């Protein structure tokens, strides 16, 4: 039985909770990726098989609230955003928590002002080893309320193991993201590492692996994204690939294959086992499940999609990317972004700006709306979005869990 976390009731949803419970009971092997359908008459909702809070997020929220409960007379800080959801972070601020840094690492409160009896919570993304050491030097135990996701720590452990075995590590991630900064920091103490953001950067790295470009060009192209003392070509001769857990799992697979092919081209297929480390076991299950479910949702089809999550949430943005080009998709942080049938506010990934779209609901009836959400989005927020959309249809039936089989028939 999955672990049950103690998180605030306000984050839970009876509707979504019952849907997830019944889907899990009927599909214990997690093989059915078809969405759940709720037919309200003029509007039909198709809800992704997997979405919302993952193990790491619920674990982090439980730790944060426990820290507050256990230390009512102490100052409580979080290193940076607990998770990438503004509503959850705002709840913690209302309870008196202060953030030491921004998500980008900008210092908001100097460490020098901290006292030995202060409480510092490490967020779900983890942090760099330098930060761990800085807190310890101040007499603060950063492990006491360490909410680092276990799957992030798994990446650190696997990367360090490979580095100790003489492999260079390619990290697929956004080099400014908290998690990737932490992963880079923990791995580089044991061996060389370099960060690539996408396929395009990996294609260029592959040219360096094959020895097609001079070392000086590598140092210029990957400046700020390789570990101190990185040697070209020596540190590109044996490689393993790990990722920022919120990246597209499919893209990580492709990047690993590109690295593998480049090594094969340089050393030959027969010698590949000595030069390439298989790291598929480091992929986050929740990221993979949510992305697979998004594909199942899109295959079931609809007239438009609404994806719910924080606007700085990497995993949520990748769900939006999967839907773009297939149908109209609106990326909203919460139900307040839905102003009614004639207006919706949403994030436009291409520009990074919050946009306003008029008359966003087509006149088609019934209208089928696809729903998914990022791993840091509470179920209650997803239900609120569904309810807000349903309210745009005065003749819609009441929102409730349907009777019988929940999954859309393939």
Image: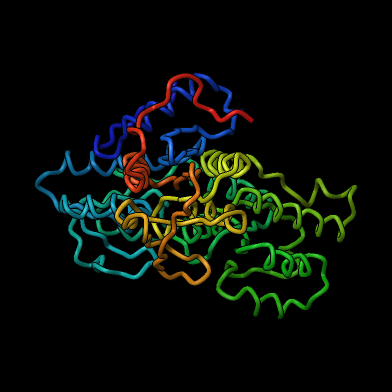
What is the residue that sits farthest to the left in this orientation? 73
Tell me which corner region of the image, top left, top right, bottom left or bottom right, holds residue 170.
Answer: bottom right
What is the x, y in percent for residue 211?
82, 70
- Quadrant (top left, top right, bottom left, bottom right) of the N terminus: top left
The residue under the point 42% across, 28% down is: 19
Give me the residue at 31% from left, 42% from top.
Answer: 61
* Quadrant position of the C terminus in the picture: top right
- x, y percentage for residue 322? 59, 53
Q: Nearer the viewer, residue 207 or 166?
A: 207
Q: Nearer the viewer, residue 130 or 288?
A: 288
Q: Is residue 248 left or right of residue 93?
A: right
Residue 340 percent coordinates (x, y): 33, 55
Against 398, residue 362 (above or below) is: below
Compare residues 365 and 230 and report the one nearer the observer.
365
Q: Would residue 59 be seen by someone viewing this image from the given angle?
A: no
Residue 268: in sight, yes or no? yes
392 to 344, vertically: above or below: above
Residue 86 at x, y = what percent? Answer: 31, 56
Q: Residue at x 40, y 40 (%)?
A: 53
């Amino acid at each position: 039985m999955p672990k049950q976390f103690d998180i605030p009731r306000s984050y839970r949803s009876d509707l979504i909770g019952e849907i997830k419970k019944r889907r899990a009971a009927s599909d214990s092997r997690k093989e059915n990726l078809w969405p759940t359908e709720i037919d309200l008459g003029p509007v039909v909702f198709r809800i992704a098989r997997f979405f919302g809070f993952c193990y790491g997020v619920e674990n982090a929220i439980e730790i944060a609230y426990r820290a507050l409960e256990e230390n009512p007379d102490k100052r409580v800080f979080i290193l940076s955003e607990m998770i990438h959801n503004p509503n959850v972070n705002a709840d913690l601020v209302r309870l008196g928590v202060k953030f030491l840094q921004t998500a980008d690492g900008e210092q908001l409160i100097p460490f020098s002002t901290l006292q030995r009896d202060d409480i510092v919570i490490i967020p779900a993304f983890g942090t760099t080893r330098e930060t761990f050491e800085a807190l310890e030097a101040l007499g603060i135990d950063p492990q006491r309320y360490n909410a680092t996701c276990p799957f992030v720590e798994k990446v650190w452990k696997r990367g360090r193991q490979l580095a100790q075995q003489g492999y260079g590590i390619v990290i697929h991630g956004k080099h400014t993201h908290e998690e990737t900064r932490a992963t880079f920091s923990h791995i580089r103490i044991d061996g060389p590492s370099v960060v690539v953001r996408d396929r395009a950067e990996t294609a260029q790295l592959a040219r360096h692996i094959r020895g097609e470009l001079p070392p000086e060009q590598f140092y210029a192209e990957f400046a700020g994204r390789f570990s101190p003392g990185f040697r070209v070509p020596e540190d590109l001769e044996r490689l393993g690939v790990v990722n920022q857990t919120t990246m597209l799992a499919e893209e990580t697979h492709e990047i690993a294959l590109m690295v593998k092919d480049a090594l094969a081209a340089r050393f030959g297929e027969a010698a590949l086992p000595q030069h390439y480390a298989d790291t598929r076991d480091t992929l986050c299950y929740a990221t993979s499940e949510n992305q697979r479910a998004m594909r199942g949702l899109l295959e079931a089809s609809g007239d438009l999609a609404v994806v719910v999550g924080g606007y700085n949430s990497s995993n949520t943005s990748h769900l939006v990317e999967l839907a773009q080009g297939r149908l109209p998709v609106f990326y909203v942080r919460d139900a307040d972004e839905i102003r009614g049938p004639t207006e919706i506010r949403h994030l436009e990934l291409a520009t990074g700006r919050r946009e306003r779209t008029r008359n966003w609901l087509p006149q088609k009836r019934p209208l089928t709306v696809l729903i998914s959400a990022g791993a840091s989005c509470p179920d209650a927020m997803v239900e609120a979005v569904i309810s807000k959309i349903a309210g745009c249809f005065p003749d819609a039936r009441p929102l409730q869990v349907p009777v019988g089989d929940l999954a859309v028939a393939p």
